[in-house]
Amino acid sequence: MLKRFFAYYKPHKKLFVIDTICAFLVSACNLVYPMIAKNIINVYVPDKKLQLLIVWCAVLLLIYVFKAVLTYIVQYWGHLLGVRIQGDMRSAMFAHLQKLPFVYFDNNKTGVIMSRMVNDLFNISELAHHGPEDLFMSVISIVGAFVMLATIDVYLTLIVFVFIPVLILFAVRNRKRMNESFMQMRKEEASVNADIETTVSGVRVTKAYGSADYVQSRFEKANKGYQKARGGAYKSMGIFGAGMGFISDFLYLAVLFAGGLFFYYGLIDTGEFAAYILFIAMLLNPIRTIVTLYEEIQSGATGFKRFCEVMDEQPERDAPDAVAIENVKGDIEFKNVEFAYAGKEEVLENVSFFIPHGKTTALVGGSGGGKSTVCHLILHFYELNGGAITLDGKDIAKITRGALREKIGIVAQDVFIFDGTIKENIAFGKAGATDAEIEEAAKRAKIHDYIETLPEGYDTWVGERGVQLSGGQRQRISIARAFLKNPPILILDEATSALDNITETQIQSSLNELSAGRTVIAVAHRLSTIRHADQIIVLEHGRVEEIGTHEELVAKNGRYAEMLGEKINA
């Protein structure tokens, strides 16, 4: 774990070395004051050596100015080091999240992921800066103080340092309890963040249904869990801090008593006793720093562990022999496909059908029948439990996901609009698209005229999840994305089911234009929209019930006719 953590220092090793050297020099500066103070008390003042007194005070002033410059570098550049490491980790985590399979996002709340990316990485950055720096400065100060104390009196120094193993033993014994407490606190914190994210996203539903009390009670439950976990973490930290503080204070008491005895019996003089007390204060400061640092280490180590949990999640991997494809016609075939979501019952059971290129195939059936799952599997979002799906006769498992998805466009019922401008949202359809291409796509999606009426046109900000737009306008942006992408295969996943009849009719003309000449898979909620499909597949409970044209299925007098309300009971 340590090796993995310090690997993130490598791109910034120059900054780290400068920070460490400056921290070392700050610690060295601190060691000078007691020795000069000893000479002032023992020699310069009693012997009335004013010139030496002034010279050494001037030397101390220069040392303090130098120390101030070093402290600025440590504070500024040290924090900059932590920020850069945090930025590297955030970039790596964000890039890794883009590669994770759908099942990861099915099983992890958005708020939890955000907590790991924001809160945990902040704690890691604090540890990345303060951890090595404070630990290094503390060790240098302790070792330096030990050497300086030994020059005053070795036996007195040994009396002092007999307490150090006691401090280390106490810290080690409390480490496990603090680690467990901080890990639980992070989990509860992530749950609170997830609840906040969900509640804020669904605030309109909450208000519409008057469910504020229910939402509040659910949040209070998560909030109390977090309070309890944080309280447990602080209890562990309190035990640790109190114990370390008592041992440090007892050490100071022992120092005063032993030093006093040595001075009383003439084993050390006044200046040495003063220097001794100053060195002990210098010794206790790094010990207190280590006590404070221990909380930081626990918090940062817990955050890094949670960061590693995300980074260790296996990304989507193409098969070793997977290849990119070009010149796709769009013939799609399901061959005895078996599929179930993780930990759930089978969604598709021995499903077989053929979708010819350049034709429109509609998928209909009751809720939970597997229609949307078929679309997800064509995009290779999940791995099959059995069977195969082919594109132009080639198993899609042998096609790189990037190449496969590049050939497929999707217009879904739940259109996701990113917090940005209209131009940026349409441009998701094609990386590097020109303004002219974006405008042409908007024209074909019949939304260009509306955009032109806006004060900022294509640069109009649409708000989070597109709250500034109507449902029809969001859907037209989705269609514009598909026009811009210009894929040979198009998936329409209940693209108009959430719209009113007038808007649906208007958008249907855009969809008809978009569908021309492409292989189209249309998941239909309103059967009236797919009457003219070249092929209709009826899916029920994960099985293919019927396949045929509208007229053929009505003539069969089966499940499709029943759904239309035209079934004739013989």
Image (cartoon, rainbow, N blue to C red):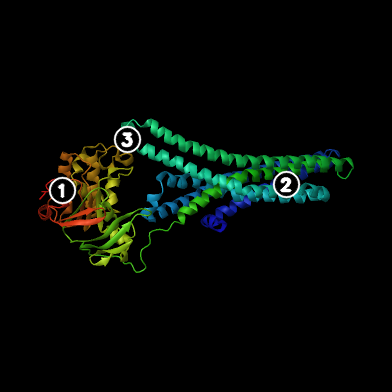
In the rendered structure, find residue 31 and report the number of the disc placed on it: 2
Question: Which amino acid, mark 2?
Answer: Leu
First of labels 1, 3 by sequence position: 3
Q: Nearer the viewer, residue 168 or 148?
A: 168
Q: CA distance from mark 1 to mark 3?
A: 34 Å
Residue 128, compared with residue 234, is above or below; it is below
Q: Residue furthest front?
A: 570
Residue 224 makes an appearance in the image: yes
Q: Can residue 78 be seen in the rendering of this structure? A: no
Find disc 3 in the rendering and name its residue: 205
Taking the image as shown, residue 279 lies to the left or right of residue 496, namely right
Q: Which residue is mark 1?
A: 562
Answer with left or right where residue 451 lies relative to residue 93: left
Label 3 is placed on what type of residue?
Val
> Which picture quadrant has residue 360?
bottom left
Q: Secondary structure at mark 1?
A: helix
